Image: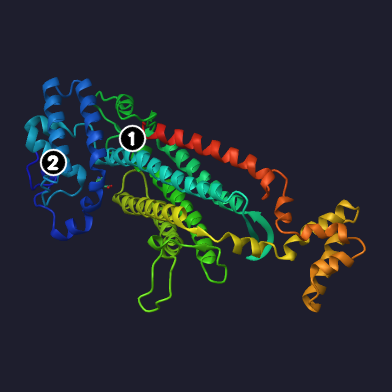
Amino acid sequence: MTATPGQPLWHGRFGSGPADELLAFTVSLPFDQRLAADDLTCSRAHVRGLARAGILSAEEADAVLAALGVVEDELTSGAFAFAPSDEDIHTAVERRVTELAGPAGAKLHTGRSRNDQVATDLRLFAKRELAVVARRILDLQQALLDVAGEHPDVYLPGYTHLQRAQPVLLAHHLLAHGWALARDVDRLCDTVRRLDVSPLGAGALAGSSLPLDPEFTAVELGFANAFDNSLDAVSDRDFVAEALFALALVGVHLSRLGEEIILWTTEEFGFLRLADEYATGSSMLPQKKNPDIAELARGKSGRLIGNLTGLLATLKGLPLAYNRDLQEDKEPFFDSLDQVVLALSALTGLMGTATFVTPRMQEAADSPTSAATDLAEYLVTHGVPFREAHAIVGALVRESAETGSSLAELVENHGDLGIEALHLLGEGVAVARRTTRGGAGPGPYGAQLTRFVARLTEDRRRIDRLLGE
Ligand code: ARG
């Protein structure tokens, strides 16, 4: 019996059609249309598998593949007419293929369920889209690297507890964000590696009595492996949860970068000026120039975390195998992908166009107390135990704060420090003295830069390979 337009796929078992309220509540077409291209890819591989198994004749397979081609054209041009009974994209495609290819089309769903189909579509989608996100991350890393390259010698205060601590190179500070993003790229690649398994052939939950070959379709679809367990294949959404975690963590990293942009653009810091195109004004306060991109990067991280925790809550009580709850995987996934891509592009633009107010940064970093640790380490090199050295310098800083005498004067007059230690308070001296591997000074920065550029180049190659370029 061939499904006719307007009837659900399961009409044989049912005496009457679905209630409007059921359709309104259960349809996923408005959002899962986004899987259309991957659904067609999945169906093409399935048709080739059916032909190979002798379930479709060569002519029937050609007819179905031709119908799938028409469906693709109609979907791309916008000519595809959805029917009210099209519950999801899979239903819509199958209905149209059956209209176009007749009885051969009605064989398309042989040995297949929407359960293995949707899992396959979503994995195909995730493989590509996570790589696209990774590419956007690389663009932001490049923007950070470019800014670093434009200001190779500039330094600013490094902070702990948001209190000035020790000077660091601006380039070093920017690459700190760059390395966090490098881990994000790695995490996304890792997620893709683990999700690279084809669920097609698992059927509704238990495989098939027909001579289908899941390994054949896995190869056709470009997956590294076929599933090992049909129940797991249709109910596993670990890859969506992992992707949502990876995206949420990207969001957290962008939020932290955003927070610094917000701080740095305040009048109080004054380290950064945004380009007009990447700032917003106030409807009431004429003088305002607001860092809305940075604020939304910070704000949207909450939503990204929510998408992750929401899906985990959906998954936690589900018995094997497929349950309709799993349809709830798509909207948070699509949303997190979209929001992260938008945030990455906006921040990349912001970074590439902002002005770094370097004199202001250096002036803040050259406050004499920035060299306090260097004074203590000077005493250490003259045999004073560090705890004692710490106390000596601490007392000088206190005296300077309380009496108003300059630290330089107190250092010069101190018996263990004196004129020899005075040069440590000079402009830019403290940052130059950060010489150990991975440290914030120009010496180790050169080696760090080389490693960062090598990592970026290798990551670009990885992503190109994932995207088949
Ligand atoms: N729209 C469904 C989803 O996204 C497709 C699978 C439906 N399967 C079913 N047995 N009702 O999960």
Image position of 33 (left or right of 402): left
Q: Give, as a three-letter code, the residue at label 1.
A: Pro
Q: Residue at x 30, y 24 (%)?
A: 216
Q: Position of residue 198 (x, y in %)?
A: 34, 33
Q: Residues within 10 Å of mark 2 (few under 14, many from 20)?
A: few
Q: Quadrant of the N terminus?
A: top left
Q: Give, as a three-letter code, the residue at label 2.
A: Glu
Is ligand 1 less than 8 Å from the beta carbon at label 2? no
Quarter of the view holding residue 275: bottom left
Callout 2: helix, strand or loop?
helix
* Up-down relation of residue 9 to residue 269 (above or below): above
Q: Quadrant of the C terminus?
A: top left
* Up-down relation of residue 210 to residue 196 (above or below): above
Q: Are marks 2 and 1 in contact (CB under 8 Å)?
A: no
Image position of 415 (left or right of 325): right
Is ligand 1 less than 8 Å from the beta carbon at label 1? no
Q: Position of residue 364 (x, y in %)?
A: 65, 65
Callout 1: helix, strand or loop?
loop
Residue 53 seen anywhere in this rendered image of the structure: no
Foreground pick, 403 / 154: 154
- Residue 74, disc: 2
Foreground pick, 437 / 306: 437
Residue of label 1:
199
- Residue 64, disc: none
Quarter of the view holding residue 122: top left
Foreground pick, 10 / 40: 40
Q: Residue at x 93, y 63 (%)?
A: 415
Q: CA distance from mark 2 to mark 1?
A: 27 Å
Q: Residue furthest right?
A: 415
